[in-house]
Amino acid sequence: MKFAIFGNTYQAKKSSYAETLFKLLKSHKAEVFICREFYQFLTNDLKLSLAPDGLFDDNDFVADLVISIGGDGTFLKAASRVKDKNIPILGINTGRLGFLADISPMEIEATFDEIFNNKYSIEERSVLKLTCQDGGKTKEAFALNEIAVLKRDSSSMISIKTVINEQLLTTYQADGLIVATPTGSTAYSLSVGGPIVVPQSNTISITPVAPHSLNIRPLVICDDWPIKLHVESRSHNFLVAIDGRSESCKETTSLKIEKATYTIKVVKRFSHSFFDTIRAKLMWGADTRC
């Protein structure tokens, strides 16, 4: 098998298992290719001695399986590189919660024994496509977790006119609006009171950030309904955050969010389920009463 490896390049402890993984893959006679930025971090900062079969930059790679070493942020970066290559991604969690990267370092050996024996499952996760249009300029971006529209340069709220499937929903008066996939329902959306949605539900959740109304609640819609947003702000600009990567937009920019034509494939152990994850990571249903 051929593997492409991405990793966290900011915290040494989150990449300390890379050498163990590398030796394990080589013991199975696998071809190992490493993202050049991650390789330089491992060899220059961590002083590891590695001899991969090759290095690659950006999305210039071909592999049977992609490995992400770090937290969910590292996984999201790997997914943005994989994009529509249709290559499954395995996340080894050396961060904190780890919903996408849910393989613990202690499970590495058992997990790869299963992978080399073809005993694993692949979940397809939907992706959001964002189209930004301002005059004659058009930009596109893609998100596995969420697209968030947020206020910028002012403490005042922004107004977000929201049209779903060509029908007006409302104009939100809020600090922002989060449009999330089921995968992203346990990320930023959850922190502002959004619903937890199972990955296979074919839905999109819409959750306001600090709305100035008591009768505004999160909404879940079909993922084949396009969403159009128009933002008004006192500062005449706003932020758009795509899986945590933010960019400033002018008030004249119109936004369209729809389901992308491709999915991200996530490698899962048969022993891991979504409900296991929310019980373990979110202490779901835990009762600490004596």
Image: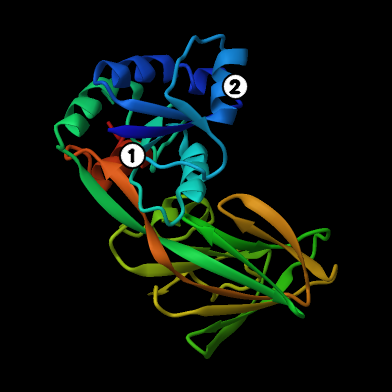
* Residue 251 as seen in the image, left or right of residue 46: right
**Quarter of the image containing the N terminus?**
top left
Q: Distance of mark 1 from mark 2, alpha carbons?
A: 21 Å
Q: Amino acid at mark 1?
A: Leu
The image quarter in which residue 267 lies: top left
Q: Amino acid at mark 2?
A: Gln
**Which label sits on residue 40?**
2
Q: Residue at x 51, y 18 (%)?
A: 13
- Could you tell me which quadrant the C terminus lies in? top left
Q: Is residue 18 something one can see in this rendering?
A: yes
Residue beneath label 1, please? 65
Q: How is the image coloured?
A: rainbow
Q: Secondary structure at mark 1?
A: strand
97 and 123: which one is in front?
123
**Label 2 environment density (alpha carbons within 10 Å; few <14, some 14–19, many ≥20):** some
Q: Earlier in the sequence, mark 1 or mark 2?
A: 2
Q: Residue at x 40, y 30 (%)?
A: 93
Mark 1 surroundings within 10 Å by alpha-carbon count, few (fewer than 14), some (14 through 19), many (20 or more): some
